[in-house]
Amino acid sequence: MQLRKAAAAAVFVLVCLLAGGIGSIFTAPEIPTWYAALNKPDFSPPNWVFAPVWTTLYILMGIAAYLVYEKGAKKKGEVDAALAVFEVQLALNMAWSFLFFGLHSPLYGLICIAALWIVIALTMVKFYGISRPAGLLLAPYLLWVSFASVLNLFVWMLNP
């Protein structure tokens, strides 16, 4: 039974890491070229910070989703709804990379990240109602996306 739970948890983490990998298809080639040429605010972190932060956040997302999934038999409708919202935020997460980096559009990225922030907050609330640790595991993600939103806003404003 423990092996089955560990495997299920690993699948959730891998799905989240895969979403990050898909986003990086649009991001990685643009970092040394398009992104490097943008005007960025002074509080913009060095490029090397993003990969470990996002990797950590994807792992936390996967663990949180697994904790909610694990409650499925007891709270089927709630769990299904929470995981559906989780899927939407994961899709918006990947979409942001495409819009911001793939299309070179800080404006579209800003619109997307605003929607992403709202859906992450909703996911946190839904997860917290099912598993408090799951909801709390998404707090660093919401904080990072809050910071990323401000960074995105400044990039848009500094690059008319």
Image (cartoon, rainbow, N blue to C red):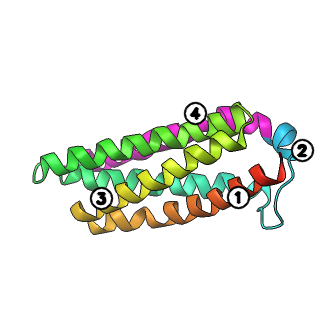
Numbered disc in front, either 2 or 3: 2
Q: In this view, does 24 lie to the left or right of 81?
A: right
Q: How far apart are marks 2 and 4 (CA)?
A: 23 Å
Amino acid type of the residue tagged 3 in the rendering? Phe
Residue of label 3: 127
**Residue receiving disc 4:** 22
Instruction: Identify the residue position indicated by label 2 in the image.
Output: 37
Q: Where is residue 7 in the image (x, y as percent from the top left)?
A: 32, 44
Around disc 1, counting alpha carbons within 10 Å, would you say few (fewer than 14), some (14 to 19), or many (20 or more)?
Answer: many
Query: In front: 74, or 110?
Result: 110
Q: Nearer the viewer, mark 1 or mark 3?
A: 1
Residue flagged by tag 4: what amino acid is it? Ile
Taking the spot 76% from the left edge, 62% from the top edge, the residue there is 45
Q: Which image quarter holds the C terminus?
A: top right
Q: Is residue 14 found left or right of 133 in the rendered image?
A: right
Disc 2 and disc 3: Cα gap in Å?
A: 39 Å
